[in-house]
Image (spheres, rainbow, N blue to C red):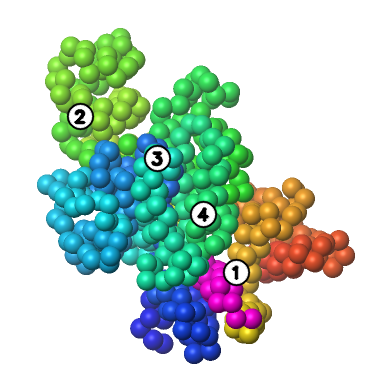
Amino acid sequence: MTAQAQQLAGPLSAAVASLCANLQPQVSPATAAGFREVLRRLSAPLQVAVAGRIKSGKSTLVNALIGRRVAPTDVGECTRLVTRFQYGTVDRVEVVFTDGRKQVLPFDPAGMIPADLGVDIARVSHVEAYLTNAVLRDLTVIDTPGLGSLDAASVARTEALLAGEQALDPVSRNAVAGAEAVLYVVTQGVRSDDQQALAAFTAATASREAGPVNAIAVLNKADTIAAETVDGADGDTWKAAVLLAQRQARTLKPRVADVLPVIGLVAESAETGGFTSADADALRKLALLDEATRDTMLMSADLFAAWECDVPAGVRARLLEKLDLYGIRCALQALDAEPSITAGALRRKLLDASGLEGVRGKLNAVFRSRADGIKAAAALASVTALAAASGDAAERQRVHNAIEVLLAKPEAHQLRLLEALTLVASGAVAMPPDLAEEVLRFGSSPDPAEQLGLRGRPTQELVAHALERAGWWRSFASFGATPAQSRVAHVVHRAYFLIWQQLRGRR
């Protein structure tokens, strides 16, 4: 096995890498250059772009996910640039210029990327941040400027980087797009142009449509939701956020696998060391205040900052910056329940209240556990696009035949399934709503029970259902489907059959 193959995400990526290597001598120099870029991308970690509207809290969430407060969150030069956070053996920041030059910059005194870079930003392509954080070993996080920004240059830089390597021609750049998956950040109201922006943004992911395979959304700033405005919330802010996220999921699906609530500010403070023992001590003093005084102070941020009490106003202002009122309330409730709680345990309570672990769990389930398939599928889409762009019919057929041989192998079923999910999610293959929903369940979770829509049911029931649905989809593929539907149906039949085999082995 070559050194490059050892870095690949798994056997599917290795198979696609072998396909590219074998085809390179048989295609034009331009297509071969594109294949080399595909090979480079296959051996790199999965790249997830964090996208969303301006002021949606993307950079704060990026910091929380990385576990280090390194991305500037205040408006500045750097927030108008694309920044890629990737693993490195030495922490460093590189400014990459449009002409390919690079300039190394120091982190600022707080350990963050400087908000102002001290260079001509019009000449900057993007920023590369190399960090020793272990979370980045198998996941590169791309922080993007806010969609909907009036800064046309920011939009152009985002599109240019996500379109791929600058050395390739425009068609090839689009074919070997930069991000393989997207974490889309929304706030309380999903607007119609969020749908369009998500579609446009994820269309840059290797020319593949957004879907449950490569897109997750988060409802950020969940603590700002007025619980009384959400039916069924019973005055509980977090319950309101969960209900609203479910509603937004219905709006954004099938473009995304799920929508999860999160409080990025609390997550960032709890996960990056922003919440300190001094903060815990200040909260202990606030917890000792009488109930009426506390309730009054917690009515608004202005009252909390201005009210006369033993905790200095400056300390309270810092607590608001780190936790906002919701996080402060959560901390005080934890102190009421356990007055002797340690600062570390209080930090973990805040982390739990932020919803970050739910987001990480979904990232692991949808992206990390399928990184091999996602990367291999994106690479195949790039290979197909490169061959189509060549204008050579013989070359296009040669590439097509090689891909068909690869996909015919039993071990390539996951690639077939990802392709089927993408076709149904994008509407390229029309399915009745109930069947489309059934197909898309395979993209929402790696758990067989959830894929079957029978979470919590006994194994025996799951086995029987998987076998019944396998038979139904086989019949549908042969007798009731259009040719396009039949191709999807055969893949779904095999998916059910494999689940049946897996579950029978558990009994």
Tell me which numbered mark, 4 or 3, is placed earlier along the sequence: 3
Q: Which residue is mark 4?
A: 202
Residue 154 placement, left or right of 105: right
Q: Which residue is mark 3?
A: 149
The residue at the far left in this view is 109
Q: Position of residue 375 (x, y in %)?
A: 49, 68
Pick the residue in front: 455 or 198: 198
Q: Residues within 10 Å of mark 3 (few under 14, many from 20)?
A: some
Q: Is residue 402 above or below residue 163?
A: below
Tell me which numbered mark, 4 or 1, is placed earlier along the sequence: 4
Q: Quadrant of the C terminus?
A: bottom right
Q: Position of residue 62 (x, y in %)?
A: 34, 48
| Front tag of 1 and 3 | 3
Q: Which residue is mark 2?
A: 318
Q: CA distance from mark 1 to mark 3?
A: 38 Å
Tell me the element at label 3: loop
Tell me which numbered mark, 3 or 2, is placed earlier along the sequence: 3
Magenta span main SS? helix
Q: Is residue 366 above or below residue 272?
A: below
Q: CA distance from mark 2 to mark 1?
A: 49 Å
Q: CA distance from mark 4 to mark 1?
A: 21 Å
Tell me which numbered mark, 1 or 3, is placed earlier along the sequence: 3
> Is residue 375 shown in magenta?
yes
